[in-house]
C-alpha cells in the first residue's frame, strides 16, 4: 500500500462517526435509517459519511426490497488493514442494542 493511500484511509477513519459506523458494520449490515437512529443524525448527514466510506472502497451496498444495506467490503485490498485497526476498538453492540428499537418503514 502506498503511504498516500494509507494516509487517506486513516484520515477517513479518523472521524469518530465514520469509525463507529465502520466498527458496527464489522458485526452486521446496516441501512441509513438504522444509522440515523444510532447516531441521532439526519439522513443526509449519515448518507455523507457512508458515501465517503463507499467512495474509498471500504463499504459496499446491496438492495433488499426498498432498502439499501451497507456492509464492509471484504474484497478491498485494504480489508486486512481495516480488520487490524478495528480489532483495537471496543464492540459497538451496546450502541446497537440501545438504538435499534426501530424499524425502517
Image: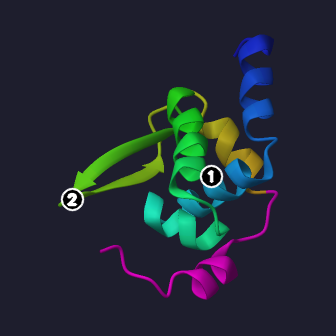
Q: Height in image: 91 above or below 98?
A: above
Label 1 packing within 10 angstroms: few (<14), some (14-19), many (20+) = many
Q: Residue at x 61, y 43 (%)?
A: 49
In the figure, 87 relative to 2: above or below?
below
Front residue of 80 and 44: 44
Point out the tag, 1 or 2, that comes first from the N-terminus.
1
Q: Which residue is mark 2?
A: 66
| Type of colouring | rainbow
> How would you rate the neighbour count of disc 2 (Cα within 10 Å): few for under 14, some for 14-19, many for 20 or more?
few
Kindly state the secondary structure of the residue where label 1 is placed. helix
Is residue 101 found inside the magenta-colored segment of the image?
A: yes
In this rendering, position of residue 29 left or right of residue 19: left
Left/right of residue 72 with respect to residue 7 in the rendered view: left
Dominant secondary structure, magenta: loop
Residue at (69% x, 37% y) in the render: 81
Question: x%, y% of residue 16?
Answer: 79, 52
Give the quarter of the image for residue 39.
bottom right
What segment carries the magenta color? 88-105
Q: Is residue 47 visible?
A: yes
Query: Is residue 31 something one can see in this rendering?
Result: no
**Quadrant of the rendered image containing residue 13:** top right
Q: Residue 56 sits in which quadrant? A: top right
Q: Residue at x 45, y 51 (%)?
A: 71
Q: Secondary structure at mark 2?
A: loop
In this rendering, the answer to whether 104 lies above or below 45 is below
Find residue 22 and name its label: 1
Question: Gap between marks 1 and 2, in whole Å?
Answer: 23 Å
Q: Looking at the image, which residue is at 60% across and 49% down?
A: 45
Amino acid at each position: 500500500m502506498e503511504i498516500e493511500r494509507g494516509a487517506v484511509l486513516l484520515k477517513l477513519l479518523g472521524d469518530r462517526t465514520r469509525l463507529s459506523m465502520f466498527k458496527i458494520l464489522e458485526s452486521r449490515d446496516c441501512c441509513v435509517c438504522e444509522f440515523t437512529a444510532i447516531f441521532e443524525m439526519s439522513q443526509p448527514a449519515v448518507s455523507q459519511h457512508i458515501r465517503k466510506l463507499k467512495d474509498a472502497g471500504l463499504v459496499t451496498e446491496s438492495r433488499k426490497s426498498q432498502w439499501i444495506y451497507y456492509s464492509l467490503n471484504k474484497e478491498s485490498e485494504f480489508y486486512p488493514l481495516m480488520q487490524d485497526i478495528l480489532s483495537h476498538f471496543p464492540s459497538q453492540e451496546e450502541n446497537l442494542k440501545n438504538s435499534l428499537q426501530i424499524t425502517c418503514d
